[in-house]
Image (tube, helix red, strand yellow):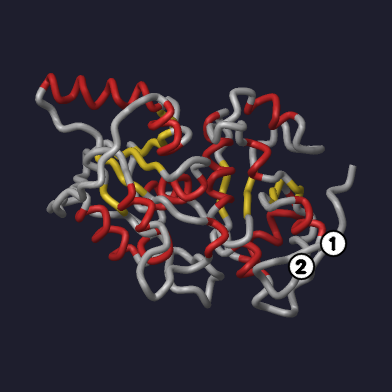
């Protein structure tokens, strides 16, 4: 079953559920600006975009404070506390059997983080609106500026429902299996590093930029399997794949893309921002060999 849903299919699903008088999917808006960093003191950085327009009935969840812990130990976007995730889900009305659809503005980077965190927390039916709000609007579907009242969901989260790596685990993984670095080539190679104090990559990691998995309209490429075949030596057919990025956001997007072609990828949530916290850890530079 696909982890993605198109705008038109989601609209039809919502309409059919309404006609049948059954509870529809819980819609979660995680609009967020990747280059903006943490939430400003004035409030969540994605909140103005949500207020300007969102899917009717969608609830806003903040990536920085509800899908991640405070920066520091574990990197810039460490795993959130289970209680924080549970509170956010319950506020959105999520129960143990709920269907959940998450989306962001366009490329699904933040939405993929929500998809991964919710599944890590034990939810089993989580999908991403492919192309986000932009795809919804391009399909001529309505948006709303009305924020629904908080609900009282009863979901109980089960953190640890997906496997994760820490820095030592990532180092060991790169020596025996496929470790993907989802950042842009310039950051992977060490030519530039706009966010973290050290440039380069985990020794043994293979560069696979997340943006290369996205079509021009912000949806996932339709030839994901073919693209996977072109990533690099030793990747195709690998049954052990892990992925990291700068702070664990775009790496989740990578995990989602791989899940669409049947590859289960393990996430290193702390990613490069966690790796470079220890100056004793080795740093490699240069392009992917081969």
Looking at the picture, how far across and down is residue 196, in whole percent?
67, 71
Q: Residue at x 34, y 47 (%)?
A: 29
Against 41, is 13 above or below? above
Looking at the picture, how far across and down is residue 25, in whole percent?
25, 35
Find disc 1 in the rendering and name its residue: 285
Q: Quadrant of the N terminus?
A: top left
Against 88, is 104 above or below? above
Local packing at callout 1 (Cα closer than 10 Å; few below 14, some 14-19, many 20+) is some
Q: Residue at x 73, y 66 (%)?
A: 193
30 or 99: nearer the eye? Answer: 30
Find disc 2 in the rendering and name its residue: 199
Between the residue at mark 2 and the residue at mark 1, the CA separation in whole angstroms equals: 8 Å
Direction from residue 95 to residue 2 in the image, left or right: right
The quadrant holding residue 139 is: top left
Looking at the picture, how far across and down is residue 99, in whole percent?
27, 36
First-in-chain label (2 vs 1): 2
Q: Residue at x 59, y 23 (%)?
A: 222
The quadrant holding residue 233 is: top right
Report helix, strand or loop for mark 1.
Answer: loop
107 or 271: nearer the eye? Answer: 107
63 or 83: nearer the eye? Answer: 63
Q: Are marks 2 and 1 in contact (CB under 8 Å)?
A: yes
Local packing at callout 2 (Cα closer than 10 Å; few below 14, some 14-19, many 20+) is many
Report helix, strand or loop for mark 2.
Answer: loop
């Amino acid at each position: 079953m696909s982890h993605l849903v198109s705008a038109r299919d989601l609209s039809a699903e919502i309409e059919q559920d309404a006609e049948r008088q059954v509870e529809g999917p819980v819609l979660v808006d995680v609009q967020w600006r990747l280059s903006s960093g943490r939430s400003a003191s004035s409030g969540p950085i994605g909140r103005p975009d949500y207020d300007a327009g969102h899917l009717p009935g969608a609830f806003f969840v903040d990536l920085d404070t509800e899908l991640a812990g405070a920066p520091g130990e574990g990197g810039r976007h460490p795993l959130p506390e289970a209680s924080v995730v549970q509170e956010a889900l319950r506020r959105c009305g999520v129960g143990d059997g709920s269907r959940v659809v998450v989306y962001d503005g366009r490329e699904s980077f933040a939405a993929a983080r929500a998809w991964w965190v919710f599944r890590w927390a034990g939810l089993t039916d989580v999908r991403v609106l492919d192309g986000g709000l932009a795809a919804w609007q391009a399909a001529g579907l309505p948006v709303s500026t009305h924020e629904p009242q908080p609900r009282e969901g009863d979901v109980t989260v089960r953190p640890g429902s997906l496997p994760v790596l820490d820095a030592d685990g990532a180092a060991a993984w790169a020596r025996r299996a496929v470790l993907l670095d989802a950042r842009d080539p310039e950051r992977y190679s060490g030519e530039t590093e706009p966010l973290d104090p050290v440039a380069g990559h985990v020794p043994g990691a293979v560069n696979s930029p997340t943006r290369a998995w996205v079509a021009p309209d912000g949806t996932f490429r339709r030839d994901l399997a073919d693209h996977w075949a072109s990533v690099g030596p030793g990747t195709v057919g690998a049954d052990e794949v892990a992925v990291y990025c700068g702070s664990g956001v775009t790496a989740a997007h990578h995990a989602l893309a791989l899940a669409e072609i049947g590859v289960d990828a393990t996430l290193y949530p702390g990613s490069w921002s966690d790796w470079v916290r220890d100056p004793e850890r080795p740093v490699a530079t240069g392009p992917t060999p081969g």
